[in-house]
C-alpha cells in the first residue's frame, strides 16, 4: 500500500516550525526520524495534509551533562544514545534499553522525541523516562513548559502535547554512584515489539536497595509506574511479594499471541529478575 498524497516542507528553525504549524493546523504532522510515521502513512493509518520535516534543526540534537542533569535533544537518535559515554555514565538505564529497540537500521534513524510523542505503550523510551522521573521540554509559539514524564502519557498513542506544540528535549537527573538499574523485556523475536518489559532503577548502599522504581511497558495503555509493587519493595518484602503486588498495578491488554493473564505472569517473572539484577 502507498502513502496518501501530502505536501512537504523542511523547517530549519523552531520559529519556522511554529509558523508552519500555525498555518496548516491539525493537518500538519512533524517528521523527525520517520521510523513510525512513514510506516503509518504507508498503511494509511495517518493521512496528513503536510509533513513538516524537522530533522535539520540543530538545537534539537545532542547530549549534554550540566548542573546535575542530562539533557538529550528530541532529535537525538537511538543509536547515538546507545553509543554515548555520557549516557552510559550518568543514565545507564538508557544505554541498557537502547539495544532492545527494533534493529540497528531503525536505531540509526529513529529519534528519542519521535518515540516519546508516538506514545506506543510497548515502546522502551517512555517507560525509561517514567522510571527515571524525566522531564519533557515542550515549546510553542506562545512559550515553553516542562512536564514530568509520568503526567505526559494519557493513553494509547495519546499524550498531553498541545496543538502546535513541539517536544524539544528530555532532561534526566544525573545518577549518583549509588544508582543501579536494569532493563528487561520479552519479545517473540529480537527486535519485535515487546510483549512486556520493565525499566527498573534503585539506589544501593551496603547491599540494601532503596528508592526502587519499576516502570512497565506493554502492561497498560501507557507506561505504568507500579506503585503497589514499589511500596512492597520499600517495605523490604521478598521479591515474590513485590511481584505479586503487580496484580493491582498492571492492566495488560491481550494481543494476538498472549492473554492478559500471560502478560501479567511474564511481568512478575521479569520483576523477580530485575530485583535480582539490582541487588547483584
Image (cartoon, grey):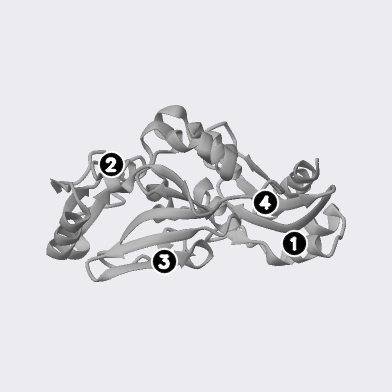
Residue identified by numbered label 1 = 229
Q: Residue furthest top?
A: 104
Residue identified by numbered label 2 = 42
Say above or below: 23 vs 77: below
Which callout, 2 or 1, points at the residue further toward the start of the chain? 2
- Point out which mark residue 201 bears: 4
- Point out which mark residue 146 bears: 3
Q: Nearer the viewer, residue 83 or 51?
A: 83
Q: For the residues carrying marks 1 and 3, which lies nearer the camera in this image? A: 3
Say above or below: 17 vs 95: below
Q: Which residue is drawn at 56% across and 31% down?
A: 190
Q: Quadrant of the N terminus?
A: top left
Q: Dot 3: what SS?
A: strand
**Within 10 angstroms of label 3, few (less than 14), some, or many (20 or more) residues?**
some
Q: In which quarter of the image is the C terminus?
A: top right
Measure how far apart labels 2 and 3 are at the Cα level.
Answer: 33 Å
Q: Which of 234 and 222 is in front in this view?
A: 234
Q: Dot 4: what SS?
A: strand
Amino acid at each position: 500500500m502507498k502513502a496518501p498524497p501530502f505536501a512537504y516542507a523542511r523547517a530549519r528553525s523552531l520559529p519556522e516550525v511554529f509558523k508552519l504549524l500555525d498555518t496548516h493546523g491539525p493537518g500538519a504532522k512533524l517528521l523527525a526520524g520517520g521510523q513510525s510515521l512513514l510506516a503509518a502513512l504507508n498503511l494509511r493509518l495517518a493521512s496528513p495534509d503536510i509533513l513538516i520535516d524537522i530533522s535539520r534543526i540543530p538545537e534539537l540534537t545532542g547530549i549534554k551533562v550540566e548542573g546535575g542533569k542530562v539533557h538529550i535533544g528530541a532529535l537525538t537518535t537511538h543509536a547515538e544514545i546507545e553509543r554515548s559515554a555520557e549516557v552510559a555514565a550518568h543514565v545507564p538505564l538508557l544505554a541498557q534499553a537502547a539495544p532492545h529497540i527494533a534493529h540497528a537500521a531503525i536505531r540509526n534513524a529513529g529519534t528519542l522525541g519521535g518515540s516519546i510523542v508516538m506514545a506506543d505503550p510497548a515502546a522502551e523510551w517512555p517507560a525509561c523516562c517514567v522510571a527515571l522521573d524525566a522531564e519533557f521540554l515542550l515549546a510553542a509559539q506562545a512559550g515553553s513548559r516542562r512536564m514530568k514524564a509520568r503526567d505526559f502519557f494519557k493513553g494509547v498513542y495519546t499524550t498531553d502535547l498541545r496543538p502546535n506544540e513541539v517536544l524539544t528535549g528530555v532532561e534526566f537527573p544525573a545518577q549518583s554512584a549509588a544508582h543501579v538499574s536494569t532493563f528487561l523485556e520479552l519479545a517473540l523475536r529480537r527486535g519485535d515489539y515487546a510483549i512486556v518489559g520493565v525499566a527498573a532503577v534503585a539506589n544501593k548502599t551496603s547491599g540494601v536497595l532503596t528508592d526502587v522504581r519499576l516502570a512497565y511497558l506493554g502492561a497498560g495503555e501507557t507506561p505504568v509506574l507500579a506503585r503497589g509493587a514499589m511500596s512492597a519493595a520499600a517495605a523490604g518484602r521478598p521479591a515474590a511479594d513485590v511481584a505479586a503486588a503487580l496484580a493491582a498495578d498492571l492492566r495488560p491488554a491481550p494481543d494476538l499471541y498472549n492473554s492478559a493473564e500471560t502478560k501479567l505472569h511474564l511481568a512478575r517473572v521479569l520483576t523477580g529478575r530485575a530485583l535480582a539484577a539490582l541487588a547483584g
